[in-house]
Amino acid sequence: EVQLVESGGGLVQSGGSLRLSCVASGFAFSSYSMHWVRQAPGEGLEWVSYITLSSTTVYYADSVKGRFTISRDNAKNSLFLQMNRLRAEDTAVYYCARGNGNYEYWGQGTLVTVSS
Amino acid sequence: EIVLTQSPATLSLSPGERATLSCRASQSVNNYLAWYQHRPGQAPRLLIYDASNRATGIPTRFSGSGSGTDFTLTISSLEPEDFAVYYCQQRSNWPPLTFGGGTKVEIK
């Protein structure tokens, strides 16, 4: 069974940092590109970042470019999102998702709250 | 950036009724349009990909149609578990991948 389990969310002050993790199981993690998607309270879904199989290509939404860094460790079946210089508007549930642009598998999400 | 506009924002229907949700793109996305169902507290669920293909395990009451800039998700007969928020999403021209603003299907 495919599973994606996020962790690392929490309450942080504006300007602070957090590192999110997503541990994958039930599939060959190193064979899939991965994404982070978020949902702010009361809002819709927003794509955040993308990383290819071997980390050679990464993309970011303009809203997080220069502040967030996506990475992965294929040996540990893990995806990461380093979030720096956090802002109130980064408050959201963050999901990791597997896919090439269609997300068939998602984690349950981890909540990040940025207090101003 | 391709903007996706969903309508209506809210759809009030009764179980057993037919639901028709619309998604319009600011430019052609060819057929690279997906639909997701999102229930509170759960992960989003892929329903339809490439405009009209049902994802694995999705009931046949869900169907997608359209091409270019205009797309429709139809739920032929609403079940109680279908009351949720639905999002369209394009992967034709990215980054960024973009989602529509969502349509909430609520119980009338």
Image (tube, grey):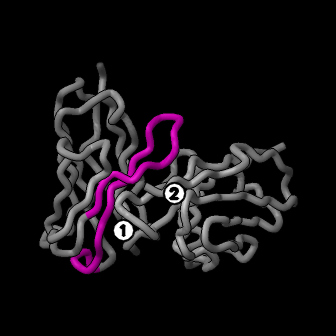
Tell me the residue at 71%/70% (across/down). B62
Tell me the residue at 30%/66% (across/down). A34
**How many angstroms separate mark 2 from mark 1 (CA)?**
12 Å
- Residue matched to label 1: A98
Mark 1: give few (<14), some (14-19) or many (20+) Cα within 10 Å.
many
Dot 2 and dot 1 within a common chain: no
Tell me the residue at 36%/47% (across/down). A94
Q: What amino acid type is highlighted by mark number 2?
A: Pro
User: In the rendered image, which quarter contains the C terminus of chain A?
Assistant: top left
Chain letter for the residue marked with disc 1 in the picture: A
- Residue matched to label 2: B44
User: In the rendered image, which quarter contains the N terminus of chain A?
Assistant: bottom left
Placement of A86 over or under A25, stated as above or below: above
Placement of A43 over or under A16, stated as above or below: below
- Residue B71 tag number: none
- Observer-nearest of B95 and B61: B95
- Verify whether residue A46 appears in magenta: yes
- Observer-nearest of A95 and B72: B72
- Verify whether residue A10 appears in magenta: no
Tell me the residue at 32%/50% (across/down). A61
